[in-house]
Image (cartoon, helix red, strand yellow):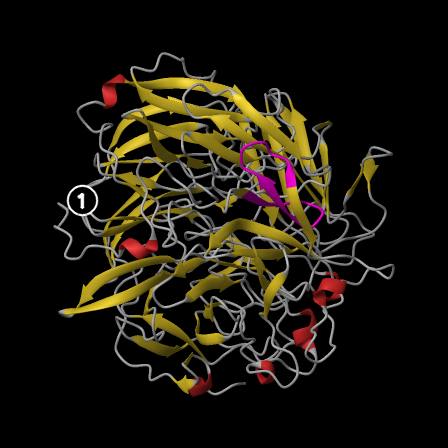
Amino acid sequence: MVPVERRNFLLGAAATLTATATDSATISEPAQAQEPLERQPASLGVTGKDFPKVCGNLANTNYSPLNQINARTLRRLGGAWHVNLEGGSTSAAQQSTCVVENGVLYVQTTQQNVFAVDGRTGAVRWKTNLGAKQTNMRGVALGEGLVFSTSGANIVYALKKDTGEIAWQRQLITEDEGGGDTGGCDPQNGQCGGLTGTLAGAVVYWDGLIYVGMQGSTGGARGRAYALKAATGEVAWTFWSCPGEGQFGNDTWEGESWKTGGAVPWIHPAVDPDLGLVYWTFGGSYPRLDGATRGGDNLFANSIVAIDAKTGARRWHFQSVHHDIWDLDNVMAPVLVDVKVKGRLRKAVVYGSKVGMFYILDRTSGEPLHGMQERPVPRNAQQKTAATQPFPGGKPFITQAPEFGKATRPVPFYAWGGLYTPHWDRATIIFPGAGGGADWAHLSYNPHTGWIYVGYGLINSGFSNSREGRVNTSRPLGEYFAGGIAAVDPRTNTPVWTLDREWSLAHGNGILTTAGRVMFQGGPDGVLHAMDDTDGSVLWSFQCGAGVHTSPISYEIDGEQYVAVLAGGNGLPYPDIPRGDHLWAFKLGGKVAPAAAPTPPKQRNDIRAAAVTGSTVTLGRVWDAANQRPGATENTVAQNAMSPQHLRVPKGTTVTFVNPAGNASAHAAVSFFEYEFDTGVLMPGQSFTHTFDTPGEFFYNDAIYPQSTGKIVVF
């Protein structure tokens, strides 16, 4: 294990971690905003007539100074225009946030098309296809008369802004005949990653360079961040997030585990032109849930790294989770703000998400602005977990353990605990989970209130080590999903208010704040809301026809303010989020009517196996769908080891639960949350009967092997 003093390096010197931090968030009543104390540097970029970058500017503040749309005028806000970019297709989710320059919107689709759309009318000016291999597309960059985009084939494209014609293209990651990743070879020492990754995140342009990240498409792709010359596509530098032999941080990986360590930067960075630094966040180490083979803190996984924008050299880093085994990667688009802390003006970077708390650091040096405490946490020797984890001064914006009165109440019979509770081969529920906290929804900094706004998810994860055939029940079947919005004051790193709401708002549900003192955010149900920025109260709503998992933007044409958003759905955290290809723009006096409301996602993690009729459930067996009967052998690790997993019966049916004599283990089926039945412990050869007299949907799991979950629908 790497000593604490080696963990967070500032300009190459060990950080001194002092101060205190509180254990849980205090949820206060909505409060009146304070007047902001400092103007933000113009060098970070400003929005207004244009919204030229994903998250607005180089600081990722997601703020517009336009104020024509405000609390007084919202009642007149309506659809200005609407276009189905892919002809009404609902086959793919959409995550691309629009950018705008000179009245033209530029946006990608998962179907690998880049569009230029007239911001006044919605007419498509041009459309360029970048291939057939689909992947998440999260936004283009603009610069030097070009539109920069990645593609599913791992090619970076520069398109002529006026026509969409390809100016150049550069293959960044290629697979050799052996399935290796030729883009994963470290030119300094010849070591290769050996596994393929995929380009990911919005592209960022600054001063002749574009910045491109990646995600792991197969386990263990060695993470790297790229800078390319905007004029030619030539690679200017590559930053390896799992350092190679002889490089700083390599000794934080056991053996050669760095070669397949993951730590991918799958969301775009921020840039400070005055300091010449790029701030990039890197994902969790791999294997995600198994720390046994990669002892050490695993730099630069779960870290924010300040990188020299021109050379790719590390200036400083901060690791928010040491030796992650929970997928708490805190990957987000960092936000840059200048704030006064304890009377001193500081250049700050706001970092953090899934753990439910922000790490607010000096962006020159990496120094924690509110202190940092390395606290002892529960350990697991098999997982080689760290002895301590860093907790920032201030307060979390959500609680950090399951709560029985909320959606985070744990499914019964699982082991469970709060943040950093370790797991091994027994599924253990923790909150915030991998899809909880703030995940990757884009934040917004509002200079009028001085607050950071963030959407969060109230979603548990049930982790187990994936070795020896055991599965990661990452979201226990039958659990509930919800979420909300928080406003945090970066001057104190304390939540001003936290509002629990109906939907998880952490997966791309970005927030836009405006000088009109309203903020915009969409949800998985397809509804775009305008809210008061002082208390989060909803002032206006509009149905977009598919889940909104992108950031709204604002722009101006001939003195008229518009708000636009791409609504196309998502695959997480709800598998049934309505999908589409709806590009909307809104203005005062807009007459285009809302879309028809789609079927909203289920707010419970549903079992999606096909319904089977009958009156018997066999425990510890996986259903043989081909032969419509229970499997021949016992299974104690699968989530679907109930045969059938989804039983549909009429009211008044008596159902027999049987642990077949051929099983070796005891089993027990217990209805949870509704508590309709409890078989008690059934030894092999024993059975139990229950008559269902009440219509409804009843989830149950095995009290001995709780990840195995079924449901019975009574009609």
Indicate the quadrant containing the N terminus: top left, top right, bottom left or bottom right.
bottom right
Residue 204 in the figure: left or right of residue 363: right
Spot occupied by residue 3 in the image (x, y as percentages of width and height): 47, 88
Name which residue lies at 59% across and 51% down: 200
Q: Is residue 74 above or below residue 475?
A: above
Name which residue lies at 49% across and 52% down: 204
Secondary structure under tag 1 reads loop
Name which residue lies at 47% across and 19% down: 82
Q: Amino acid at mark 1?
A: Pro
Spot occupied by residue 346 in the image (x, y as percentages of width and height): 24, 68
Quarter of the view holding residue 350: bottom left
Asked whether residue 160 is drawn in magenta, I would say yes
Range drawn in magenta: 147-166
Quarter of the view holding residue 499: top left
Q: Nearer the viewer, residue 237 or 321?
A: 237
Q: Is residue 666 above or below residue 701?
A: below
